[in-house]
Image (spheres, rainbow, N blue to C red):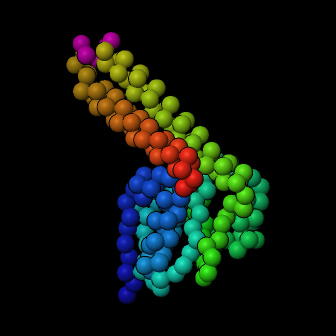
Amino acid sequence: MSENRVELLSAFRYVVPAQYEQWFEGLAAKGWHPIKVGQWSSIAMRFVKGTPERYRYVVDLQAVPQKGYKQIYEEFGWEYVGCMSNLFVWRKPYEDERPESFCDAENLRARNQRFVWAISFSLIVVAIVATLLTGWIVSHAWDKGQSISYAVGAALGWGVSFYLGSVMRKIKRSVRNGTM
């Protein structure tokens, strides 16, 4: 009988790509392997207990993958694990030296910049929506008894904005320290 486990909100807990990769690798070393990485895996990711393995995991943000993207990784021996929205997950077994996926500093910088742009865009959109909701509360809803629903929406928007801001700080700190 196989043993399973579910990890909740992993993509939100490990927002720096290198940390997310290390988390996957740590689980694999303990014998936990993702069953299927798919659209909802950022919310709940299922793992099955198996043989402990040394895998190098890579998470790569690709909003619009170029033609042949998957084929190039596979030609270099990487196994496609799955994709959460536009976050591709790859792995490669190894024994001695941990393999690198981004062969030069420029490709690594490009991957990191894609993460920064995606988080920045999300932060801006959520902050605009939260500002609009706050403005609506102040100018209209307060007098009409609709303040609670709009206040909850605004509070959630500001909460997400602050979370995304902290994510940006973590990513920028990791880039500056060279740990990403």
Judged from this view, the residue extending furthest toward the front is 177
Q: Is residue 153 visible?
A: no
What is the magenta range?
A: 139-143
Residue 168 image offset from top left, x and y in percent: 49, 41
Residue 33 image offset from top left, x and y in percent: 48, 75
Left or right of 159 in this view: 38 = right
Residue 53 image offset from top left, x and y in percent: 52, 81
Q: Residue at x 44, y 29 (%)?
A: 127
Camera-side residue of 28 and 37: 28
Tally of marks: 0
Quadrant in which the C terminus is drawn: bottom right
Vertical relation: 27 (above or below) 171: below
Camera-side residue of 27 and 130: 27
Vertical relation: 36 (above or below) 16: below
Q: Looking at the rendering, which quadrant does residue 47 occupy?
A: bottom left
Q: Is residue 20 visible?
A: yes
Vertical relation: 49 (above or below) 128: below
Q: Residue at x 54, y 37 (%)?
A: 120
What's the magenta bit mostly, secondary-structure-wise?
helix
Specify whether residue 77 is painted magenta: no
Q: Residue at x 50, y 31 (%)?
A: 124
Residue 166 image offset from top left, x and y in percent: 42, 41
Judged from this view, the residue extending furthest toward the bottom is 1
Quadrant in which the N terminus is drawn: bottom left
Q: Residue at x 56, y 75 (%)?
A: 55
Left or right of 176 in this view: 109 = right
Vertical relation: 103 (above or below) 164: below
Q: Looking at the rendering, which quadrant does residue 45 occupy?
A: bottom left
